[in-house]
Amino acid sequence: MSEQPLDTVFQEWHDNQAVAERMIPLIGSLYRHHNVVTTLYGRSLFNRSVIRILKDHRYVRKIEGTELSVQDTYPLVKAMTELNLGPAHVDVGKLGVAFKKRGGGDAVAFLREELAEIVDGHNPQSGNGVPKDVVLYGFGRIGRILARVLIEKAGGGNLLRLRAIVVRGRGDIAKDLEKRASLLRRDSVHGPFDGTISVDVEARTITANGNVIRVIYADSPAEVDYTAYGIDNAVVVDNTGIWRDEEGLGQHLACRGVAKALLTAPGKGDVKNIVYGINHADITDEDRIISAASCTTNAIVPVLKVLNDEFGVAHGHVETVHAYTNDQNLIDNYHKGDRRGRSAPLNMVLTETGAAKAVAKALPEFAGKLTGNAIRVPIPNVSMAILNLTLDHAVDAEGLNDYLRRMSIDSAYQKQIDYVDSPEVVSSDFVGNRHAGIVDAKATIANGKNAVVYVWYDNEFGYSCQVIRILQHISNVHFLKLPRAQA
């Protein structure tokens, strides 16, 4: 096989860069003016760099075995701007592959057929609906990532508006506000905030990319009247984990201006534990207190769901290799939990996890089928769940991986399940991944009815994206997803 001349390869790269640069304002226009979110096999193209767009196109070859470049997708994106589209999430990657297989041709005619449900569906007079106020109660690791995602998604019909954060008073308000803003601005794991942040000490606000966020100081929910800040019918996202049952979380509902409370930890008692994509349809209008379960539960439930649907799961064990968290000690010191008092950066710490039992709260058919343990390891983020399963039906590793790959790219669980097939990936490669979990195909073991599946997950960012999806659902923020999933 002859190689391309070096000059030709270099010129091709520059040509693709130029096309990606022309694509960016079109993607922005679709988002801002038509509420159309463009994706590439589930990866958002909005507000992405030229290099990121090119890399995401390269990803298609790895996941689909089909080459796709911006030369293929640019005509489709350009044609989309001419069709007066209504609100939707449109996967131009899948459309691009289908267009290539068809042999190309008239892009507008192709899209009129594929996107018929939203063609000429834009009504500029209808507005974007009524924004839903969101309050973050607690501003720790998860709270700040939720803030980043909410700010990123502001506009374009998302309708979720971060209005306030609630934190405990720290004395010097000016200094406290600057520190809160600094923690939002800089993150040792997730990098710098993508945008601008300013502080108004007198107004007690932090403004991030034009979003004015009130900072409310309170030691308990009972101290807050949100209507005094112009906030009403809000969803309070409790990131503290202090209260996990209806009685404790009910304190938020007693506050003026609060409609619902969402807990970013496993709920206790009768609180519904929701894994978006799996059992979010169980949420009713009467449910005012909801839990987003745990990061581990969110990572494993979608994979377990699809495996059970196809092969049946008789029983299994879940071993979680989890990044350390801030409830552990930096150096050996007293801790009420077993082993967790030992230095987190210096030890692997064997501990318990409720994730295996919690699976049954989202998937009742798994009641009594799973056991689980966890090992905390000396890294600050990204964890792994090892699913050691006995299946009802025999399968080999190739068949199992092919099925999970298809679930990751063409099913209702595309946002929950990601898939990687590389012998070189390590935990840091998944920092910032927005899926609930990522199947590591190279690690899959399957022999008859015995299977071991390795699932990576960003226990901070991936989980936070699942929380946002629940927020969108309970706030009636729904988008048609095109092209329709085949599985």
Image: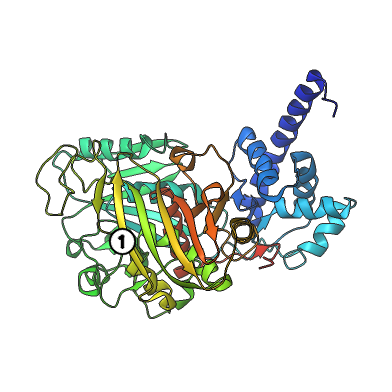
Residue lying at the far front of the rendered structure: 448
- Counting from the top left corner in percent of width and height, residue 133 is at 40, 61
- Which of the pair 36/232 is nearer the observer? 36
- Which of the pair 150/242 is nearer the observer? 242
Is there any visible trace of residue 385 in the rendered image?
yes
Q: Quadrant of residue 252?
A: bottom left
Colouring rule applied to residues: rainbow
User: Which residue was labeled with disc 1?
Assistant: 265
Q: Quadrant of residue 45?
A: top right
- Which of the pair 86/124 is nearer the observer? 86
Q: Secondary structure at mark 1?
A: loop
Asked if 32 appears above or below 261 in the picture, the reply is above
Residue 429 relative to residue 274: left or right: right
The residue under the point 22% across, 61% down is: 224
Asked if 327 appears above or below 392 in the picture, the reply is above
Q: Amino acid at mark 1?
A: Ala
Residue 379 relative to residue 402: left or right: left
- Which of the pair 113/175 is nearer the observer? 113
- Counting from the top left corner in percent of width and height, residue 175 is at 21, 35
The N terminus lies in quadrant: top right
The residue under the point 58% across, 56% down is: 397
Q: How many marks?
A: 1
Is there any visible trace of residue 435 in the rendered image?
no
Asked if 24 appears above or below 154 in the picture, the reply is above
Asked if 405 appears above or below 279 in the picture, the reply is above
- Counting from the top left corner in percent of width and height, residue 32 is at 61, 50
The residue under the point 82% across, 24% down is: 4
Mark 1 residue crowding within 10 angstroms, few (<14) / some (14–19) / many (20+)? many
Residue lying at the far top of the rendered structure: 7
